[in-house]
Amino acid sequence: MITIIFSLFLLTMLVLVAVAILRTDNLFTAVMLSGIFSLIMAANFFVLDAADVALTEAVIGAGISTVLFLGALALTAEKDRSPPVGSVVPLISAVALGSVIIYAVMQAPRLGDPKAVVHNHVAPWYLEKTPELIDVPNVVTAVLASFRGYDTLGEVFVVFIACMGVMALLGRVRPRKDSIKLTEYEERSRNLRHHLIPRIVGKMLVPFIVLFGLYVQFHGDFGPGGGFQAGALVAAGVILYSLLEGDWRGRELVPEWFSSLLVAAGAFLYASVGVACMVMGGRFLDYSALDSHDPVHGQHLGILLVELGVGMTVTGVMITIFHAFARRGVR
Amino acid sequence: MQLLGLYNYFVFATLLMVGLYCVLARTNIIKSLIGLSIFQSAVFLLYISMDKVDGGTAPIIPSDAPPDIIYANPLPQVLILTAIVVGISTTALGLAVAVRIREAYGTIEEDKIQEMDREQ
């Protein structure tokens, strides 16, 4: 009962925050509200028994996405100057879409109905066979990295390509020779070093964030977590450090060549595990072939390596994208 | 009670409407991107709502688990987990385009950009 009340509250909050985002014309407010939106969404996912997804949404939606939006705001504008009353066409299309969907969901199975079609097709097979074939406790990790490894490989390459796109658009900015050197004041105002409390408290948090990221990376088979969450967490730690100390100090900590290398090396590691499976006599990404004596051990090894590849790519991509935005502002 | 069981889907529909309206009605590119991410989150909510099973728990099977535990459906979770990461990457790409538009036109309002294009 309490869970129901709690989830009703959270869902209602979601709608309220979304409407507030729509109504405000200050983009800074909108971005902060969208961070709150993501945090409420993460709590919602947790109530709905999706621990892995909740972790991902909290790190990426509430953390990194907010920072990227703020970075983009600093380079564009702070005010939404849309005309206050637009045409009615958007309103009509939105309401039409909403009505069609509400009509459609009236037939949907209610929340948590064990007889719903989704729960009676292929899902029970995964739940039943994972302990036997893969033997890792977290079924989400097993499906993500092993059963549906092709899918995840594709996703890693999508992230990789998006990162290349951002780099192609914003580029590695070479400092111009004739560029004016920043004065000491300007240099100081580009970071939070003159704010003592955020700086000290934030800096204390950085090692713990990175440590938690590593825990999530290597404990992802047993508990909620895995490469995607871990990569975002480690990147969040580095980004927090860069925000506190200035992005040039962040680039000293993790040089750009290193983050680019991570992006490529992670995707390469993932794909080469697949090729290694083929060389050992199995199919592409069939980790059982990695250990000829004990297929389950092969699966463990394969999942560990693949998740490491995912983690490396995601870390690299997030840091590279952040630096691309942060560096653009220096020119 | 029947309607209460569908509340997640109604919220999904409302968020979809808000997101779509934000994308279509606002001329500011960043605001449109925020609307797009609301739209995206609404779809995530739809999928994750489908994974819930009454009396279930997160799909993590301990080695000494009693056989009668009910687990949530892992499949929608896997799909959405990767979709979130891909979503932020594509949003970053959109933001990069917005930054370049600002540098080229000096504004990120669609109507002003179109005006400038027409004048040329």
Image (cartoon, rainbow, N blue to C red):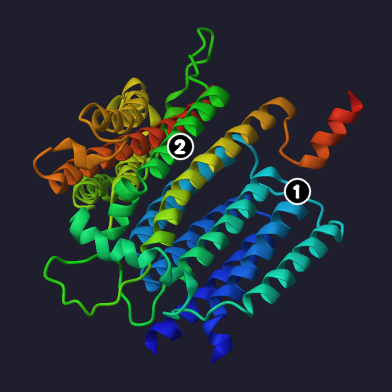
Residue type at mark 1 is Arg
Do the residues at pointers 1 and 2 share their chain?
Answer: yes
Neighbor class of circle 2 (other Cα within 10 Å; few <14, some 14-19, many 20+) is many
Q: Residue A241 appears at what percent x and percent y?
A: 32, 39
Residue at x-position 58% and y-position 41%: A73
Mark 2: secondary structure: helix
Image quarter of the C terminus of chain A: top right
Neighbor class of circle 1 (other Cα within 10 Å; few <14, some 14-19, many 20+) is some
Q: Which residue is mark 2?
A: A159
**Residue B108, image quadrant:** top right
Tag nearer the camera, 1 or 2: 2
Chain that bears disc 1: A
Q: Is residue A49 left or right of residue B100?
A: left
Q: Is residue B81 left or right of residue A272?
A: right
Q: Which residue is mark 1?
A: A81
Residue placed most toward the observer, A321 or A152:
A152
Tally of marks: 2
